[in-house]
Structures are given as structure tokens and as C-alpha cells.
Image (spheres, rainbow, N blue to C red):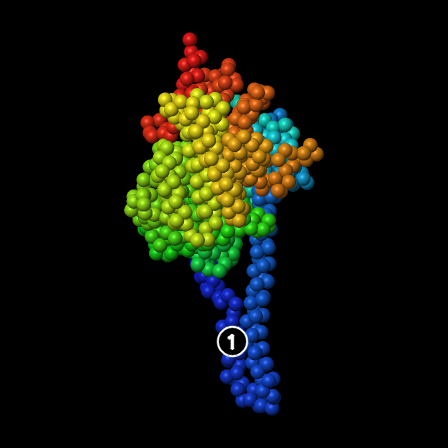
Amino acid sequence: MTELSRRGRIRNWIDEVRVQTTAHRAELGVGGALTVSGTILILQEELLRQLLGGLPIWVLIALIVVSVVVPPVAIGAIKHVMRRTRAKAAQHQISARHLDPAEKLVGRDAEIARIKRRLKRRSVLAIRGPVGRGTSVIARKVASDLVGENTDQLLYVDVRGASKDHPESALSVAKRVLRTLGLQISEIRRAEDAGDKVGAALKEQHYVLLLDNVSSWSQVDWLPDGVQEAHVIIAGTLTGIPSDGSVAHIELASLDEQARQDLLAQHIGDERASSEPEALKQLADACMGNPRELVRVGAWLARNPRISLQTMVNDLQGTDTAKTLQFVLERSFAQLKPTARKLFTLLAELPIAELDSKAAAALLGMPSADDAIYELIDMGLVERVRNQRIRVPKTFRDSGVTEAAGRSRRQVAAWRRLVEHFAAQAAEHARRLSGAEEEGKAAEDWFAMEDQVLQQVLESAPDPRTGRALAAIGDALDTWYRFEGRDEDRLNTAALLAKAAEALKDEQLQATAELRQCSLLLAVSEVREAHQHFNKAAQLYGGVEQGPAEQHLAYATLLLAAGDDYKTVEQKLVQYGQALGRNDVLGQAVQLTNVAALLMRKGQALFMPGDEKAGDEAAHADGDVPEPVDRETGQASREEAAAEARRLYTNARIVLYQALDLAEQARDKATQAHAHELLGLAHHFLGQRHDADQHLVQAETLYGKPEARKPDKTAPTPEEQDHKVDRTGLGRCKVHRAGFLLEDPKHQPAEVAALLVEALKDLPPTGVSRALAHLHLSRLQPEQAGEHREKGAQALAPWQGTAEPQQVKVLRELLEAREAAESP
């Protein structure tokens, strides 16, 4: 590449010196005002002495206060007004760039008309083109035209995620779309589960949904093929679109020669363009018809009016589009003020793709980064994305302009400040989740926007001095995902935290994360994996008997899931209670709930599987199947066992009422729901069906059972939108209720089967409850008995090759026994 002409180079150098000189002016001008006042006093000392000599002391004091306070305050106020005016102007420019893209749509009328014609025939349409071709701008224009003045009908979703290297997964995109529609996301375990819900919501409200910056068709292949009375527009590079014609799409072509020149002239001014028509043509051709690069080159020339188009052409002669971008970037970067240059350098090196203004200020170590952000936007070096966030385009990240040998001390310090900022924000918003309505809603909105950024922070290479901040981020994310009922995200966060802690060699933090993974895996019956994480935690804590209260609880739960060592389980629950803090009301509630579950498990173990009623009753407890006793003990032993079981159930009921009272004091709905669920089972075992039903209803309500929508409702209320659902808890309750119905001689098999099918939608893929549901369905749906038995056995797969409790062993035998009985 050749250099700028001498005249252009000198003018450019003068501009840079002027820009950097003005960057060092005082922010408020306090020092300047006082210096001027001091000079006046020095020069006119005698005059002032004569003038003020006869005034009272209080007047002199007032004059001094006014002379010291008023000038800086006035200058600061003027500066504030100027900044607000500039911010509003920049905000208007940003909004126009996103919502009214007509000024950029040069040479695209024919393609826009073709897209609109296709949308009349197909409700789902993809607009595909390489980066910078203009797919986003055209898609926004078409979507805006479709809704007209009904702007509330347009839903915009930018699917770019927090990672600069990896695109959003299909599941993450599906959850983002559901949240935009105001729908529940806790029940979605696969992207495919969201398709019908999205289609129904779009049809009901006649929405136009625009998914922007989609890099791969696999991110959105879960969308419905068509939506009546609504439209879905997908824009981006969209690699991997099926070639069989099943997906309607339009490929954007590059701009023709005249359109290129018109677009470039639009940004540099018609008068300047007409003065150098040949240079304009050559410059437009150098950008290869790429609208984004034409806009960037035009904007740079508009900011540098002293550089002729021919000079630019000379410097770009023989270069490709990438070199053109490099040329513009280098010169734009050189013209930045020091603060904006520092911010751009830090942003370009971050592992996180986008930040809000507060995070950018933390990155800089300054109270505000607004001026630097507006400067970068004006220069076209960063983009405004959703909710006033900024993002460095990938082409600028890969340009090498900001590259340095390794991470500098300044970058390390900036990253540490950013992590600590996120930790403080996350902890504060996690605390507010359970606050008042407006406070809680604000916290939910914050986490919905930042949770992926926080996960990206955990995934990035940790700084040795950020261990405490990473722990706070992990705890806050766990609180948020638990609030949302997103157990898979909780597990992923715990895994990321454990990996970061291992890199930091923080054994306490790693052990905490390993225990968290153990508990979450036990909740979905992944016993083998849970045991591995528990062993890691125990090793880090220095043994099974060491460690905090959570380790004793996890060990008790693990023992109960993997066997029938009731004595050791009871001992661990006692140790858990002893390790709790004196005022830990929730911990005490959890302890009592687990003690009650242990008592009920003992009661179930007293029955023989041959006792049909006792066996079915015991099976209802989260799928528990009774442990058989020695048949040689005879009928008298069974009667004694029944009396002992009744005593255990009665004691469990007493303990559960105590646990429920403590859980209500702690205001923890999850523990309250679990207590009500177990109370329903305890009352059922004691023959108190009405009370059992009432407690199951309470459990379902607390687990978040959605209310039936009234016929006159067309959209969910804010309360319904905020209603969180524990799908696994609801699934267990449905299995319990189905077991209750099966004991009624007048039960309707089709009704019970439908209830169990609904339960399977809520339950995780493995576990005793799922196996029990398939066992019941194999009897209720004999035509599908073989399939249900096979799926029931698959649900018990986590216990294969490992120690298993008697309930799992008997349940497996029942599945195999029915298969053997029905075989020829």
C-alpha cells in the first residue's frame, strides 16, 4: 500500500494533533476558573483592598464562597447539559440506524419487492448473504413495512451471543425467542420443544418475528415450517440451508456499479462526489459492492474532508476489500482520543463479545465511559446492539490493529475490574430476585440480558485474583437459574465454576462447585456421575467427615439413592443439622424434610412386593417400590410390619409439618412444595385420601402449575408470564396422582394414561418416577406394553453396574416380570 500524498498526510497529521490536544482539557474546568480568579487578585490586589476594606466580615465571607463555588458549578452544569445534548443526538442517530434503515437502502428496491412477494406465499422466509451484504438492514426494512404503524407487532431478536468465537446454540436461541414472546422457558429442554409454543404465540398475536444475525440454519431449524396470520423473517449468513427446497430463502446479490457509487456519494456528499467522478467509481469498485465497507469508507472520508477521493484511491490501488477495511480502521483508530482508543483496545481483546455502558466504564476504571462510547460509534468502530449494548465487529477484532505481545498489565487489571463489576452486579440482582414486584422484575430483566455474559466470564481464563468474584458470579447464576427452574443451566454453571476454581487452585471453591454438581445430578438420578463429583469434593475437603454442612447432606442423599444404608443416612442427616448455623431456618427445614423422607422409605421397605395394595402405595413415593422382607416370617410378621410402617408414616407426617412451618418462615417455595408433596404421600399411606389430595394440590401450585387460561383472555398477564415452573416436581406429582387413581376400582384407564403421558413430558429422561410411569403405562396401554417396558428399563440405566437401592431392584424385576409373562 502506498502512503497518502504529502499534502494529505500533513493535513491528517494536523487533525490528529488537534484531536489529541483537545482530549486533555479539564473535564469541569475547576482549575482553570480558580487560576483566572487568582490572576485577577494578584494584578488588582491594591484595588480590591480599597474596594472591600469597608465591607462587613460576613459579606466578605459570602463573596469568597460565591467566587469559589459558583464558577466550577456553573461550568460543570454547562458541561452536563452539553453531554446530555450530545447523548440525545447520538441516541437518535443510533435509533435511526436500527429502526429506520431507509437511508442505506440504495439499489435494493427490486429485492425488497421480491421478498415481499415471497412473504405473501410463505410465512417463514430466510434472507441470506455474506457479512456486510446488508441482510439485516433489508430484513428490518421489510419487517417494518409489514407491521406499518403497529410497531408493537414487530419482535426483533438478535441471536448473536456473548461469545465472540462461538455462535449461539439452537436451544439458547429458542429460549431467547420464548423470552421475547413472554413465554416460559423452564420447561424447554430441547430446541424442538419450543417450535409449537412459538408458532401458537405468533399466530395468536399476529406477530412479525425477525431473527437477525443468524450464522447457521441449525440455530433456527426448530422453528415451525409455517405460521398462519404471522411472519418469521430470518436474516444472516445462514450456512447449511437445506438444498431440497424445503426452506424458502432469498440470496442477496452484491450492489451493481451505479448503486455502489450512489451509496458512497450518499455518505461523502453529492457535491464532493460529483467533483471527482472517476475517483468515486474506482473507490466504489475497490469495495467490491459490499455495502458495509462502502458505508465505512464513506463515513471516514466525510470525517476527513481535506483528503481527496483520488488520494484514497491511490492508497487503495491493488488492494482487496480486507485491505480497504484495514486502511480505514488504522486511520480511524489513530484519530481516536486516548480514552476511546484505550476502550477500543480493551474491547477488541475481550473474550466477551458485548458489554453495556456500566461494564465498559468498569473496564476503563472510570465513572463513565459514555463519551468514549459515543466517539467509537461516531467513528463506526463499535455497533450498538440490543438494550444499548456495544459490540466490536468481528472484522475489527481480527484486524490486528490492537494486537500486542501477550496480555499487558493494563489488560489484566481491566479484566479484573470487569469481573469484579459483574460479581457485584450479579450478587445485588440475585438478592433482588425475591424482592418487591418492580425490584424483582428489574432483576429478572438484568439476568435475562447478562446470564450468558456471566457464563462467558466463568469460562474465560481466570485471573489469580478473581477467585472471590467468580464464586459470587457462580452463586448468583445458580440463584437465577434455580429461580427460573433451569436445572441444566445450573449444572453447566457449576461445571464452569469448578473448572475455573481448579485453574486457580482454589480447593474450597472447587469443592463447593463439585458438591453443587453432585446435588443437581442426584436430582435427575445420575447416580454414577454424582458419586464421582462427591468423591472429588470429599478429597478436596480432606475426607467424608470433614467439609461443610452441604457435604453431609449430599452424602446422605447419595447413600439413599445408591442403596439402603439407613443408619448411615440418618447419621449424616444429624451431622448436617449440627453443621448448620443457629439461624439457618431453611437448612433446618431441608434437614427435617429429608428425615421425613427417610422415615417413609423405611416404612416402604417393611412391605413385601406380593402385597398388592402396600406395594402400590409404596410405589407412589417418587416411584419407590417396597423392599421385600423374608417370606419365612409369615403373615404375623407382615401385620407387625404394617403397624410399624403406620407408626413411621405418622412420625414422618409430624416431622413434615415442622419442616413446612420452617420453610414458610424462610419463604422458600421449593422446600414448601417438597414438604407438601411428601405430606400428600404420607396421608395417602395412612388412608387419608382427602388430605392427600389437598397437599398434592398445594405442591403443584408451589411447583408452579400454570392456571388454565380463561376463554376471554388473548394474552398472558404479567403475573402469568412471571410464573416460574418446576417441571420435574410437577411430573412427580402427576405420577403420584396417577397411582392414587389406579387404586380406585372405578378409575378410567384412558384418563390415568393421559395423566402419565403428561407426566413424562415434565420428567427428566432418567429416574425412578419415569420408570414407574412407564410401568403403569405398560399395563394401561397393552398395545404399547413392550415399548413402555423398554423405556422404563432405560430410565433405570444410571444404576446399571452400580449399587442400587431395593426399590430400583424391585422395579426392574417388575418390568422384566411383565415382559416375561407376556412373551410366548
Furthest residue toward front: 636
- Quadrant hosting residue 421: bottom left
Furthest residue toward top: 824
Q: Position of residue 656 (x, y in %)?
A: 50, 41
Furthest residue toward right: 712
Q: Indicate left or right for 545 with 276 as reference.
A: left
- Quadrant hosting residue 555: top left
In percent of the image, x 56 and y 67: which residue is there?
Answer: 76
Closest to the observer, 477 or 39 = 477
Q: Position of residue 754 (x, y in %)?
A: 56, 23
- Quadrant hosting residue 556: top left
Say above or below: 663 vs 797. Answer: below
Q: Is residue 347 visible?
A: no
Q: Is residue 52 visible?
A: yes
Q: Position of residue 705 (x, y in %)?
A: 57, 35
Q: Indicate left or right for 261 with 403 as reference.
A: right
Say above or below: 162 vs 115. Answer: below
Q: Position of residue 231 (x, y in %)?
A: 61, 31
Badge 1 is on which residue? 34
In percent of the image, x 57 and y 44: which residue is there?
Answer: 98
- Quarter the C terminus occupies: top left
Closest to the observer, 239 or 289 = 239
For mark 1, give the secondary structure: helix
Circle 1 Cα neighbour tier, 10 Å, few/some/many (<14 / 14–19 / ≥20): some
Closest to the observer, 558 or 56 = 558
In percent of the image, x 52 and y 83: which residue is there?
Answer: 41
Q: How many marks?
A: 1
Closest to the observer, 180 or 805 = 805
In percent of the image, x 32 and y 27: which residue is there?
Answer: 801
Task: Name the amino acid type tagged 1.
Answer: Leu
